[in-house]
Image (cartoon, grey):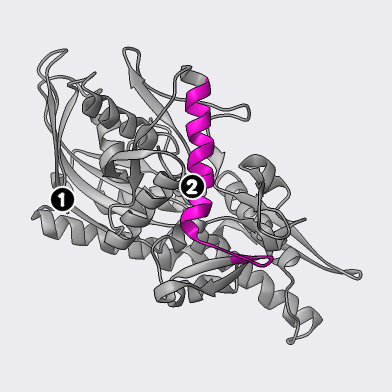
Amino acid sequence: IDLGTTNSLVAVCDDRGPRILSGDAGPMLPSVVRYSADGATVEAVGDAARASAAMHPERTVASVKRLMGRALRDAEADRKYLSYELVSGEHDTARLKVGARIITPQEVSAVVLRTLKDRAEQALGVPVRRAVVTVPAYFDDAQRQATRDAARLAGLDVLRIINEPTAAALAYGVGLRAGKPQTIAVYDLGGGTFDVSILRVTPAEKAGETGYFEVVATAGDTHLGGDDIDQAIIALLMDEVRAKHGLALTFSGRVLQTLRDLAERAKVRLSAEDAAAIRVDLGEGRTVDRTITRAELEALMSPWIERTIDRCRQALRDAKMAPGDIDTVALVGGSTRIPLVRRRVGEFFGAAPYTALDPDQVVALGASVQGAVLAGTSRAALLFDVI
């Protein structure tokens, strides 16, 4: 299972190899949960919850992965962009308030995991009790434990927590031509987190034998991803709304959720187009019309992208390598579809990044490979990771 900030997926690896298990709406399950007004029950999960988020902003929870195992003070930077209320829990942990109920991030993630568990059981026709779950390589012990707790609440026994870039390398490396070792850099920029890992991959000599995956170094940031780019667009729009309609203007949960949706859509469009038009309806006849260009977005994004490049430098230093020592740079995470990201990664490593794998699906596929190894049904890989 790839439990993601924006979307989550489940995969299985059997005699046919690794494959994603799709639901009615496709392979990706948006990591979004809508609760009832009193917070007592779950009303919708995934696409249905995301589609109605602007109608029920205060009780629709998204991007909760950023809150897993974190203190409330760690969430302060995100707070003004969230449509739901954050409160302090035990040991100052970040929690959510929906109606009269206080909900932990683990409980929200458990709803997503339980939905994926149900999807797997329906696709495979057998009960599913054990899983491999991925986390960002730079998740600390509290964040990893929170992920395990969420899985336990969902009725899953987590056999292994595996780092996301390592899982991606497993999916990539299992298909490498036998006898040709490679050094791979996995650049993983998702919705909420960034990781880069340097791995040495030695494929199996022949079918049925074991390949070796050694993680040499890893670096990252558990609060750096596509959400930050969305927030930069939202901040730009909020400033312009206030300039037009008054500096004291406050933003309701509905408007915040609408801004979030518009920002994300504009970001996605600007990966393929040079400009994207945005219209913000504030109600009472007040609107803001704005066109954002790709050049403008790239100027907003550059500080975040340069932070990822700094982490790449750190990982190479730790591995005692130079960019030229990397044979392949694999891109993982939906945010790597952004042209500026691909351009800067290519410039830094001096080679065009490898983009043949679906950046949204590769982590779940790699986790399923590890699951097959732990279940004893595959000898595809022996994994040495760093802690």
For the residue carrying disc 2, how many other residues have a C-alpha within 10 Å: few (<14), some (14-19), or many (20+)?
many
Mark 1 crowdedness (10 Å alpha carbons): few <14, some 14-19, many ≥20 = few
**Could you tell which of marks 2 and 1 lies nearer the N-terminus?**
2
For image coordinates 47% across by 45% down, the residue present is 334
Which amino acid, mark 1? Val
Residue type pointed to by label 2: Ala
Q: Residue at x 62, y 26 (%)?
A: 24
Magenta includes 81? Answer: no
Magenta part of the chain: 97-122
Determine which of the numbered discs, if any, sits on residue 257 in the image.
none
Residue 113 belongs to magenta span:
yes
Left or right, residue 371 beside residue 209: right
- How far from the left and from the top, in percent, is residue 347? 31, 52
**171 or 72: which is nearer to us?**
72
- In terms of depth relative to the viewer, which is nearer, 288 or 38? 38
Residue identifier under label 1: 386
Q: Nearer the viewer, mark 2 or mark 1?
A: 2
